[in-house]
Each structure stands twice: as structure tokens, then as C-alpha cells.
Amino acid sequence: MNLILLEAADFMAADRVVLRDPRRLAHLREVHQAAAGDRMRVGLLDGLMGIGQIESLDTGQACLTVTLDQPPPAKLPLTLLLALPRPKMLRRVLQTVSAMGVARLVLLNSYRVEKSFWQTPFLEPAAIEEQLRLGLEQARDTVLPEVLIEKRFKPFVEDRLPALAAGTRGLVGHPGSYPACPRALSEPVTLAIGPEGGWIPYEVEKLQEAGLAPVQLGERILRVENAVPALLARLF
Amino acid sequence: MNLILLEAADFMAADRVVLRDPRRLAHLREVHQAAAGDRMRVGLLDGLMGIGQIESLDTGQACLTVTLDQPPPAKLPLTLLLALPRPKMLRRVLQTVSAMGVARLVLLNSYRVEKSFWQTPFLEPAAIEEQLRLGLEQARDTVLPEVLIEKRFKPFVEDRLPALAAGTRGLVGHPGSYPACPRALSEPVTLAIGPEGGWIPYEVEKLQEAGLAPVQLGERILRVENAVPALLARLF
């Protein structure tokens, strides 16, 4: 937690917050070993970032005086379509997506996504937001990415993706004899990353029809949790 | 497992292998749902890759006829110095390093590495090799990276690092007002990535004296498991 994420409900006055939840309190006390007088980076969810000075801290609550005067870092101009990963990986990937500044994430079905993955409680809105917040706290950001859940591949790719991808550079990460993933783009991008085992040929065709061009990242097959940071770091 | 990694001991003849270990057998049967006649990608540890055709498969053993005729993918010309991560992250990072083709990994002490991390059984040679093999099987490679363990920062950085880094582009990933991490290099690189919380200023100075120049990857602070693939994908 490189930034303490505050919510409107934490504020007692414009410059004064009280934290009472066990997670943030434990983190302040145990990881930061914070004490009265210490200054910490803070940020208001969907708002500005700045500094909080601890006025008091005990097992039940922490009181801070805060100054919020810095904008959060810019988001990547990216809509990331991700075939739904297995639940354990989903949680880490949500943190990664949020930490790296993806503006919009679409969790999408694919032939090779196991049906049971859609049953995980980690897809509930509160569970998704929990992981996204951890990513913001890690990276020092305050703005949650938008997350869309699309359980049906074909209607999404045929009916909604062309509008989402309009005006952006559309790419599909896919192993094979495709052009190398481009580098250091400044334009908006729509990028699709497949499941373990990859997109099936029908899916690559449909994504191409929607305006996404296949690109590859070399001979090595990466796990989704590595492919996401690798592709983002190369693209932007 | 996108490649079945074979060892010399698996070979009954130049083109015939028998697998008897539960891990590979279970993977063949349960993940690949393989049956006699199926063809799988295989590779000999530290040797060539190719195709194995399953001649027979039951709960006790699998017999394959193999043809090994392709070289493994090239390694990245990279020596990666990594402050020892916490044990759970160490295992994943070892897989990542191996999957992404790092030639040499140095696990290094740092002021912010907790002393207890050095006690983990995951640092035993067999445990390290297990994770590295998983990375090779994921990425389709056969050549293990070299791994060095350096429990003392100063003697390593003063006495051995200058020789290791000689003739390479030396870089330290470090947040701050440094030049951006360079892109698409073809020369050999020595890259140092710090612990959670980062290198302390003394360490950055010592790494600089050994010829490593600080570079940054943007305002966002990434976890080590994301910083590694992000930096490698940007550098190469």
C-alpha cells in the first residue's frame, strides 16, 4: 500500500479523516509502523492525491489531517479485452490492470474459458472492486478502471465491440506468424488477450472482423499474468 | 505445460521415452486428455525441441516416440539482479524469469529484504529448479537460466558486479526523476530491480558505481511480479 485510499465517508471535515476499518488500520500499524506525526501518501477515491499527517493512531482508529492537491496519474488510453482467467489468476490480473492504469477492462467469454470460471464469487462487483483498489493503492492512483463483464463472445464482438474500438488501434495478442506487437504508441488502443491455450481460429476471425489486427510477442508463450504487463509495457 | 520437458533418464532409445513420474503423467491425462496417437510438443532439458507421439498411456507410464530437431528459442541477453522477493512471490518470479528467457538471474540482498526471506525452503536448489522448469514448460524452452544467490550486497556489488556487467548496458529500475527505461535494445543488458519499497539511496549509489544507470518506468509503482515482465518487454 503505497497510498492510503480514502472515501468520502472517511472525512469528518474537508481536511480531516478518521479511519476505522481493520484493513487500513492494520496496514498503517504493522507494515508502515506508523505513529502520530508521520506523513503518508493519501488519495480520495476518484479524486485528488496528497499527504496525510497522522494526528493519532490506536487499535480502534486513526485520525489524519490531509492535504489533497495533486491529480492522479493519467490512465493508459486502453480498453483491454481479456478472456476470463481462472479465479485465482483473475484476482491478481485485476490488481495488475488497476495498478498499470488500464482505463477500461472487458472480461469476455471464449471457447477455452472453462464454464466454471463464471461461477466464481471473485466476479461479484464488491470482490472485483476490492482487487482494483489494491492495485490503486500499490500504484498510487485513485481512479478505478471501468469493468464490463461479457458472458457471450459473439454478441459482444459483433454488436458492441465495433463501437468500443472505433477510433482506436485494434490489436489481438496471438502467437503465430503475425507482425510484432507495436511499441510506444500514443493513440488509444483496444487490445484483446486470449485465455490459456489461446483464442480459437473462429474467435481470431471475429475479432479481426471487428477491427482488431493480430500481433505477436515472440516465440515464447506467456501466462496471462505475464502477458498483460508485458504487452502494456511494450504498447505504451 | 505447452511443452513436455524430457531428461536424459527418460530415454530408452534415441527416439523413445518413457515417462513414469506422477506430475507429467497427470498433466498428460488430465489437462491434455491425451491418448495413444496424440502428438505433443516435447523438448530435452538443455537440448533440442520437437514432437512426441504417444504410443501408449496408462496410470503408470506413458511411452512416446520423439523427434527432436528444433533449437530452443534464443535467451534474452540479460543478467537480471533481483532483490530477493518474499517467498510466495519468489516462486512466481522464478517461473516468469525462466519463461521470458532471462539468461542469468542473481538473487541479491538489499536493506529492505526481510532477513526471514533467506530462510525459505524455496531457495533450495531443487526448489528453484522446479519453478524454472515450470517456466520452460510454459514458454516452450529447454534451457534453464543460470541462478546465482548473493546474500551480501556490498561484496557482490563492489567485487563481482563490475566484471558481470562489463560490456553490457547497465540499468537500475528505480522510481524517481531518472531517464525513462530504454526500449528495444539489442545489446546485452545488466538490469537491477529492487525490493518492495525500493533500493535505499546507498544501494543506488553502489549500483551506479558498478556501472548501472537508474531508469524509471513511470509514476506508477509496480509490484516486482509486474515490474519484471514490464521491464523485460520494454527493454527487448
Image (cartoon, coloured by chain):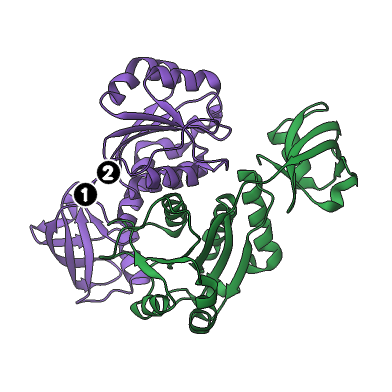
Chain colours: A purple, B green
Circles 1 and 2: CB atoms closer than 8 Å: yes
Would residue B75 be found to the left or right of residue B43 on screen?
left
Question: Horizontal and vertical percent for residue A47?
Answer: 16, 49
Would residue B162 be found to the left or right of residue A34 on screen?
right
Q: Is residue B184 visible?
A: yes
> Which label belongs to residue A45?
1
Amino acid type, mark 1: Leu
Question: Horizontal and vertical percent for residue B69?
Answer: 76, 40
Q: Which of marks 1 and 2 is nearer the N terminus?
A: 1
**Residue A156 quadrant:** top left
Question: Horizontal and vertical percent for residue A216?
Answer: 49, 35
Q: Residue lying furthest right in this view?
A: B13
Residue under the point 40% across and 79% down: B209
Would residue B142 be found to the left or right of residue B220 on screen?
right
Please, is residue B213 above or below residue B226 in the view? below
Amino acid type, mark 2: Leu
- Same chain for the residues at labels 1 and 2, yes or no? yes
Q: Mark 2 lies on which chain?
A: A
Residue placed under numbered mark 2 in the picture? A144
Would residue B104 be found to the left or right of residue B193 on screen?
right
Q: How crowded is mark 1: few (under 14 residues within 10 Å), some or many (20 or more)?
A: some
Image quadrant containing the N terminus of chain A: bottom left
CA separation, marks 1 and 2?
8 Å
**Residue A197 quadrant:** top right
Residue under the point 19% across and 46% down: A46
Q: How crowded is mark 2: few (under 14 residues within 10 Å), some or many (20 or more)?
A: many
Residue under the point 37% across and 19% down: A210
Residue under the point 54% across and 72% down: B164
- The front one of A233 and A143 is A233
Q: Total marks drawn?
A: 2
Please, is residue A221 above or below residue B162 in the view? above
